[in-house]
Amino acid sequence: MSETPPPIPSTRPLRCARFESHRNGAFTTGRDRAMIEDAQQQALAWVNAHPDLEIVSVDTACGRVLTVVTVWHR
């Protein structure tokens, strides 16, 4: 058995779109949640505006001053 995964068939290159949310203020769970929801809403609006894309993955990363949602697509 080979340890190399099989290639992923595709006719289009893999690309990504980034959506960011910044907030000032005290570091609370409510503030973090608001940042995540803001960035996710931006990403959802973009995905819904591009129904022809194949979505491969959606990643969310949240830090102290920035949340980033990355949509990987073809």
Image: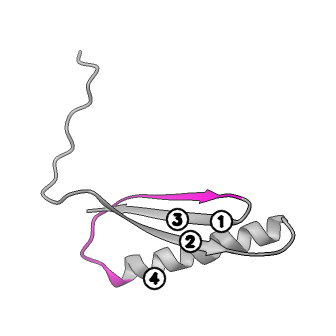
According to the image, label 4 marks what residue? 45
Of labels 3 and 2, earlier in sequence is 2
Q: Amino acid at mark 1?
A: Leu
Query: How packed is label 2: few (under 14 Cα within 10 Å), some, or many (20 or more)?
Result: some
- Identify which residue is drawn at 48% across, 74% down: 43
Which is closer to the viewer, label 2 or label 4? 2
Expressed as whole percent of the image width and height from the top left, the position of residue 56 reads: 34, 57
Q: Which residues are magenta?
A: 49-63
Q: Residues within 10 Å of mark 1 (few under 14, many from 20)?
A: some
| Proximity of marks 1 and 4: CB atoms separated by less than 8 Å | no
Please state which of the two labelled residues, at mark 4 or mark 3, is closer to the viewer.
3
Residue at 87%, 70% in the rendered image: 26
Other-residue count near label 3 (Cα within 10 Å), few / some / many at <14 / 14–19 / ≥20: many
Q: Earlier in the sequence, mark 2 or mark 4?
A: 2
Q: Which is nearer the eye, 10 or 69?
A: 69
First in sequence: mark 4 vs mark 3: 4
In the picture of the structure, the residue carrying the numbered disc 2 is 20
Q: What is the secondary structure assignment of the residue under circle 3?
A: strand
Q: CA distance from mark 1 to mark 3?
A: 10 Å
